[in-house]
Amino acid sequence: MGEIEATVPVQRAVTDDPRIPVVPGFARRATVAGKSAPQPPRGAGKTLRERVPRASHCALDLPAGRPDAVQAVEESSRGRVPGLAPIRVGRMAATPFAFLRGSAGLMAHDLVGTPVSGVGAQLCGDAHAANFGLYGDARGSLVIDLNDFDETVFGPWEWDLKRLATSLVLAGREAGADEDTCRQGAYDTVGAYRRTMRLLAKLPALDAWNAIADEELVSHTDARDLLGTLERVSEKARNNTSARFAAKSTEDSGDGRRFIDAPPVLRRVPDEEAAAVAAGLGDYLGTISEDRVPLLARYAIHDVAFRVVGTGSVGTRSYVVLLLDHRGEPLVLQVKEARPSVLAPYLPAVGFDVPAVEHEGRRVVLGQKRMQVVSDILLGWATVDGRPFQVRQFRNRKGSVDPAALAADQVDDYGRMTGALLARAHAHSADPRLIAGYCGKNEELDEAVAAFAVTYADRTEADHAELVRAIGSGRIAAELGV
């Protein structure tokens, strides 16, 4: 994709107006020309290159005492539902890309030894290629964006970008693409991130906040080879609703609609457990926008079930709650345990303080809202039996591209699209002028992060192989194919 030009009026220096005080939370006014002033953000970003050269981002120096793959998986399983650990191990063992999906904490451990510019942004924390997708907005239209924020936290923007680039290499290899294509996918991911950040830096602040409308995304990222795939995913997503899930997963018990047991993925829970989840939704109502409360007041809670989700999330407590309106039409909410971000223990080592978290579900929700252009209108948080949970719509017209099933000529297109979306998400919490100043106009950063991505993909393949051997030897239990 070539550089996109933007016409931006020149901001002229103005005289400080003593009538209007500087208000905390707002930017300072421009100073009089000729007076001393802080370095502009773009220039400050360029200056950071002197301390942290862009070419240095190719480096991967694994720290001493790094846990092996089995230790990392076992450690990350602490505090989860014990009986589900073998399912999680089995899902991670499926492919190296699946292993990466379940090992965000291990990668954060490894990233501590890599260069960081010191510029922070709200991170997804698990920005791999499968964590982008479609979902419905308030009017039923489809939006494409990042869609998983369990690990969200404020930290170095490079960590999200390196995880995304690495995932493109692994997904490409799984899809059967040759090594040059996989590396190009990572390279194009970084290039799209860099160019999009430069575009956002040129725009007025409000325009930058809402930039790159979804209908423009394909042309902006030159991802036309993805059009057919995106159309198929969109068509499927429109039918992926609460009503469709409820029709397949519930039955009329004679005493109302109830979930149907489908172990180990979906199972009914004891009445006491169901009552605790339902009670937690009372506090949840106080975490959503007040104008949504009358909407939920038109639904009654009918049933609660436990549902296994994801790859990295397997073993967390996750419930689906069936609500029915006056016509018997369903709305299903997901009530998912919110554990501390796996990135948090590693951020102080690279200069980022981690503030005390009031509620882990609140952290997830606020992080999601800081990164997405449009978020679920029913997004909130709750506490169930003393544990923090996030609450959201289940099957809200969700759809996703499987990056490991793409054709070889689509890998770079998908990389450019996700790289642009990640830049847009980061620009909501970080000044795009600062990151754009650091990233620059040439491809130096693209080359460096692509090289890192290939190296870390090799490391992930070795970790995956170690996990598979451990399963074969009986060192760790796994339930495969679930």
Image: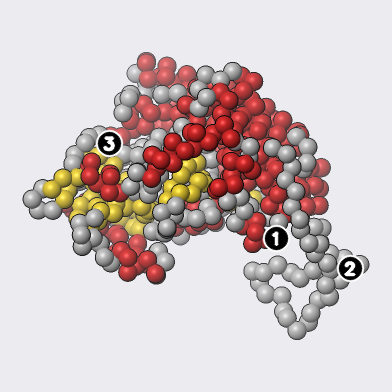
Classed neighbour count for the residue bearing mark 3: other residues with Cα under 10 Å, few (<14), some (14–19), many (≥20): some
Q: Are marks 3 and 2 in contact (CB under 8 Å)?
A: no
Type of amino acid at the residue the image marks with label 1: Pro
Dot 2: element = loop
Q: Please state which of the two labelled residues, at mark 1 or mark 2, is closer to the viewer.
A: 1
Query: Which label lies toward us, 1 or 3?
Result: 1
Q: Which residue is mark 3?
A: 265
Residue 170: percent from left, percent from top: 54, 26
Give whichever of discs 1 and 3 has the lower sequence position: 1
Would you name the residue on which mark 1 appears?
204
Residue visible at 47% across and 19% down?
Answer: 465
Is disc 1 placed on a helix, strand or loop? loop
Image height of 44 relative to 174, above or below: below
Q: Residue at x 61, y 30 (%)?
A: 412
Task: Look at the image and tell me in which quarter the C terminus lies.
Answer: top left
Towards the viewer: 122 or 217: 217
Q: Could you classify mark 1 by the number of other residues whose Cα lies within 10 Å: few (under 14), some (14-19), or many (20 or more)?
A: few
Viewed as shown, does residue 307 lie left or right of 27? left
Vertical side of 24 occupied by 453: above or below: above
Q: Three-letter amino acid code at disc 3? A: Val
Distance of label 1 from label 3 (alpha carbons): 47 Å
* Image quadrant occupied by the N terminus: top right
Q: Given the image, on which type of amino acid does mark 2 rest? A: Ala
Q: Which image quarter: residue 4?
A: top right
Residue at left offset 64%, top offset 25%: 183
Q: CA distance from mark 1 to mark 2?
A: 21 Å
Label 2 sits on residue = 33
Q: Earlier in the sequence, mark 3 or mark 2?
A: 2
The x and y percentages for residue 462 are 52, 20
